[in-house]
């Protein structure tokens, strides 16, 4: 299982979060389908790991599975989620809820408008985590909340803390979300498309903020996005997901310099700022197959410019190529030449 | 907030006007001449015409309407044909009794309906939920008069726990606290009957709101914060789900007044409903019209109150 | 069985509906009552207003207890209770369906006009709706049916006139929502006429919620008719109606001693209304899987 180990094949000590063999199934009206399969990666202390993919790739399911916030019909059927030496899947739900969520891992979501409760004040929502788990006095909790709001760059936090979400701008709301995620100083922060709903200037500010927090507080961030520009800006390592599987994994530097998987190449080719030529984007034809209609063999074969007969028949293994892990037959060292 | 209240008040002015027009129209459409009841066969046509003119019944409808309206705003609701009783007095005697009954049913509807709805939503798709859903559907399906008769049959005739009707024990002549307890004892069955279908409506509405709210992003945020289920359900979900339930406050009022007609007549509760039924049998259109006017106004005020409460409860509107 | 285009909105709704046990039970109950209404004369050997005499043939067989000849006994005038229940289904279903037809037509038109044209038209129409809903339903119904001489058709029109406001509000809300959707703006952009837009884009899209409203409205109309008839201002004797069959139960002797007179008509009313509600709930869930 190459994807469950890092480059040296062993678990390194600095890894704060290690996910291995993670498989999630959803039961629907039309049957049971696996949304993600055998997903594995490690997040190093104080680093940012980006999970990139189009919608339907399984990137959000992966992050929700780590938080154990899957929808009612979703279930983790295999794998491990090890946070700081503890497998979360072995813990009773009570423990997860009381000791892990909001304390050791926090999560910020895509839509700061809908992710904040409209009828509770900013202060109520930030202090809640402290009051619920840490038994801190209300006054101390509010002081801490004001401090965190100031850290995330909210001016006059003493005033803001008494306001309701609808009284804040989109960027402010996302800062509040981040403050909420930060208030109990978690080991890992999962950010699920935190800037998608924001406009470009605000997006840049929020990314700067996350980057600063990572450096100042040593927070490890798992950053979920569909936007490769953002990945280049913020991440140290990157995972590319397609149709429920990781297809490529490596450092941002390696992956952006030398993308190996045809899908990653396609994505990078489809990136406007790197091609420089607006209006003539080399896009990947077709769409991500739905969870119920995944093709046999390599899941990307029907959109892949390099597909050959083996790709339809046989699911590719993961190969180590340069600095990256790649799930593609093209990199099979035992590949016979004629099958190209 | 203040602007919102003013806007709602202004909006309700044409509605009040419409209510009076409709009430008046219903009265005018009623068959028969009010004087016809008193016609002495010996009276001459000229004399009849004269008294018609004297009463203003020959004036155009809008003159009659204006005259009637100016009396109504002064609190004069007219007199009954038979016995010349003041309608205002008659209704004044009955209104408090109806309010006791409808208010009890109103409180019962929400005190029982909201928890049932929350329980159904929190245990969505379990046996408890299905059981509560079927209970609610039966609650809205059972004809209230049939349910009332069943209750009398069961609790008065077979078990003898509650009186079959009336508001006080006439023979006992209780006073003070004993009288209150006596009224309460008489109130149990009619209040249950009147509230049943409202309980069902409130619980269905609460459940569906609560189910929607529990799917909101901010509930997921709350879960991500590791909050206890209780805190998620009550602090985050319930309060949001309750705001729309306030609209049902307003809708319940006409519903309960309607129900009071039937409930009061089954249980001989001396309120406006049984007065109304009596008035219909006696063709006392003046009473019917006055009841329409009063309840419609109460309903309008109730809706207005509900809207204002809604605004107070929701910070997004409050500011 | 494939009765709609595969995976169309209606095909998916149909499949969801067929999986919903309560909805199927509801549909079965409703159809059973329609069947009873249609075939009432075949199902009973008696007429609804046929009087029966006691054994000696001199007096009417009043309040006879259930027997082989009269499965649910006879009523105050010596008529067969079961037969009156079967014929009562006709009246109930006729009144409910016709009333809902009227309220749906009025409500849909008012809602469409108010929602589509907006402005003053909307303001005026919605204030009229406000006026009508300010009157408790039964008050209005009672006023209407006392002013006009009570008959089955007055009951139909009275219920239809009172019920249209719900449909109007629903349709208006849906129209406001649909009007903002891209394909409607697009149609307007290319200069389609209002009539065309309403017929081609709006009507098909409000069909599902209106169908649900029709079902729920029918259930409520059944209850309204029963209540009016019970209060003596609805369907009048000798025409049998489930509501007017219960009038007699207000006499304590009948209530206490003759349950066959009043329990069966009350129960069938409950059953029919419950069946229609099950059906309506099933339709709503089928059209709107979110719930």
Image (tube, helix red, strand yellow):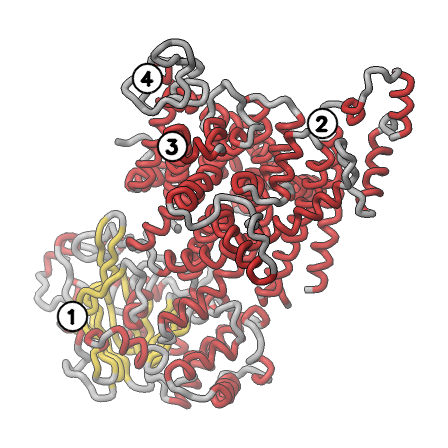
* Marked residue chain, label 1: A
Foreground mark, 1 or 4?
4
Q: Which residue is mark 1?
A: A319
**First reached walking from the N terminus: tag 4 or tag 3:** 4
Subunit bearing disc 2:
B
Check if mark 1 and mark 4 are on a common chain: no
Q: Residues within 10 Å of mark 2 (few under 14, many from 20)?
A: some
- Closer mark to the observer between disc 3 and disc 2: 3
> Mark 1–mark 4 contact, CB under 8 Å?
no
Q: Which mark is residue B7?
A: none
Q: Which mark is residue C43?
A: 4
Nearer to us of marks 1 and 3 is: 3
Q: Residues within 10 Å of mark 3 (few under 14, many from 20)?
A: some
Mark 3, secondary structure of its residue: helix
How many numbered marks does the figure carry? Answer: 4
- Separation of disc 2 and disc 4 at Cα? 42 Å
Q: SS at mark 1?
A: strand
- Residue bearing mark 3: C259
- How far apart marks 3 and 2 lie (CA) works out to 38 Å
Tell me whether marks 4 and 3 sit on the same chain: yes
Say whether marks 3 and 2 touch (CB < 8 Å): no
Q: Which residue is mark 2?
A: B30
């Amino acid at each position: 299982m190459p994807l469950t180990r890092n480059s040296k094949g062993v678990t390194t000590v600095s890894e704060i979060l290690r996910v291995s063999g993670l498989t999630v199934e959803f039961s629907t009206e039309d049957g049971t389908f696996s949304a993600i399969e055998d997903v594995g990666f490690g997040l190093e202390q104080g680093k940012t790991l980006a999970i990139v993919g189009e919608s339907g790739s399984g990137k959000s399911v992966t992050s929700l599975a780590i938080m154990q916030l899957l929808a009612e019909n979703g279930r983790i059927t295999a794998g491990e989620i090890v946070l700081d030496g503890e497998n979360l899947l072995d813990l009773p739900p009570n423990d997860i809820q009381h000791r892990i969520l909001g304390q050791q891992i926090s999560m910020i979501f895509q839509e700061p408008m809908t992710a904040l409760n409209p009828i509770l004040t900013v202060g109520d929502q930030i202090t809640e985590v402290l009051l619920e788990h840490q038994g801190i006095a209300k006054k101390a909790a509010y002081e801490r909340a004001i401090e965190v709001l100031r850290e995330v760059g909210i001016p006059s936090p003493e005033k803001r803390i008494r306001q309701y979400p609808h009284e804040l701008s989109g960027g402010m709301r996302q800062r509040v979300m981040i403050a909420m995620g930060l208030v109990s100083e978690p080991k890992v922060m999962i950010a699920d498309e935190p800037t998608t709903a924001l406009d470009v200037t605000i997006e840049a500010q929020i990314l700067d903020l996350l980057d600063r927090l990572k450096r100042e507080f040593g927070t490890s961030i798992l950053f979920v996005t569909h936007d490769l520009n953002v990945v280049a800006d913020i991440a140290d390592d990157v995972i590319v997901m397609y149709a429920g599987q990781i297809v490529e994994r490596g450092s941002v530097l390696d992956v952006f310099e030398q993308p190996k998987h045809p899908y990653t190449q396609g994505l990078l080719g489809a990136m406007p700022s790197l091609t420089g030529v607006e209006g003539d984007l080399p896009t990947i034809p077709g769409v991500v197959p739905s969870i119920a209609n995944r093709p046999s063999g390599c899941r990307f074969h029907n959109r892949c410019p390099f597909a050959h007969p083996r790709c339809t028949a046989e699911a590719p293994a993961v190969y180590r190529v340069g600095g990256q892990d790649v799930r593609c037959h093209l990199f099979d060292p035992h590949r016979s030449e004629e099958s190209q | 907030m203040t602007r919102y209240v003013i806007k709602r008040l202004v909006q309700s002015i044409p509605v009040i006007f419409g209510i009076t027009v409709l009430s008046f129209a219903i009265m005018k459409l009623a068959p028969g001449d009010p004087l016809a009841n008193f016609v002495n066969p010996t009276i001459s046509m000229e004399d009849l015409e004269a008294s018609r003119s004297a009463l203003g019944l020959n004036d155009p409808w809008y003159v009659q309407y204006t005259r009637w309206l100016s009396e109504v705003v002064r609190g004069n609701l007219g007199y009954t044909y038979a016995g010349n009783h003041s309608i205002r007095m008659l209704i004044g005697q009955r209104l408090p009794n109806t309010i006791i009954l409808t208010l009890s049913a109103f409180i019962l509807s929400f005190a029982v309906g909201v928890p049932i709805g929350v329980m159904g939503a929190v245990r969505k798709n379990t046996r408890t939920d299905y059981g509560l859903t079927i209970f609610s559907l039966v609650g809205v399906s059972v004809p209230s008069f049939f349910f009332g008769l069943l209750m009398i049959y069961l609790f008065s005739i077979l078990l003898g726990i509650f009186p079959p009707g009336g508001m006080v024990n006439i023979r006992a002549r209780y006073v003070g606290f004993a009288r209150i307890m006596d009224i309460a004892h008489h109130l149990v069955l009619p209040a249950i009957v009147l509230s049943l279908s409202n309980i069902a409506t409130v619980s269905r509405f609460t459940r569906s709101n609560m189910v929607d709210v529990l799917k909101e992003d901010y509930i997921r945020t709350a879960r991500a914060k590791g909050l206890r289920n209780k805190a998620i359900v009550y602090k985050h979900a319930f309060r949001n789900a309750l705001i729309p339930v306030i609209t049902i406050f307003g809708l319940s009022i006409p519903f309960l007044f309607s129900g009071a007609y039937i409930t009061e007549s089954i249980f001989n509760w001396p309120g406006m409903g049984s007065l109304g039924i009596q008035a219909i049998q006696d063709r006392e259109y003046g009473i019917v019209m006055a009841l329409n006017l009063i309840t419609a106004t109460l309903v309008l005020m109730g809706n207005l109150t509900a809207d204002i409460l809604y605004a107070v409860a929701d910070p997004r509107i409050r500011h | 069985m494939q009765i709609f285009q595969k995976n169309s909105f209606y095909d998916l709704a149909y499949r969801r509906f067929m999986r919903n046990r309560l909805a199927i039970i509801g549909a079965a109950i409703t159809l059973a009552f329609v069947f009873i209404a249609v075939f009432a004369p075949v199902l009973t050997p008696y007429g609804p207003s046929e009087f029966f005499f006691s054994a000696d043939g001199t007096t009417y067989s009043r309040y006879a207890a259930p027997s082989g000849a009269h499965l649910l006994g006879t009523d105050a005038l010596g008529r067969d209770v079961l037969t009156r229940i079967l014929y009562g289904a006709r009246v109930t279903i006729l009144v409910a369906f016709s009333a809902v037809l009227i309220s749906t037509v009025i409500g849909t038109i008012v809602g469409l006009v108010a929602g589509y044209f907006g402005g003053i038209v909307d303001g005026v129409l919605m204030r009229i709706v406000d006026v009508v809903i300010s009157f408790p339903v039964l008050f209005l119904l009672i006023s209407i049916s006392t002013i006009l001489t009570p008959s089955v058709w007055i009951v139909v029109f009275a219920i239809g006139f009172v019920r249209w406001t719900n449909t109007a509000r629903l349709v208006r809300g849906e129209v406001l929502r649909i009007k903002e959707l891209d394909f409607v703006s697009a149609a307007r952009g290319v200069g389609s006429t209002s009539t065309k837009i309403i017929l081609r884009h709006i009507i098909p899209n409000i069909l599902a919620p209106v169908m649900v409203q029709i079902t729920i409205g029918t259930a409520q109309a059944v209850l309204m008719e029963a209540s009016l008839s019970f209060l003596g201002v609805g369907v009048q004797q000798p025409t049998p109606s489930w509501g007017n069959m219960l009038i007699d139960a207000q006499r304590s002797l009948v209530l206490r001693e003759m349950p066959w007179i009043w329990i069966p008509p009350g129960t069938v009313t409950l059953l029919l209304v419950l069946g229609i509600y099950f059906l309506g709930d099933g339709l709503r869930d089928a059209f709107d899987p979110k719930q």
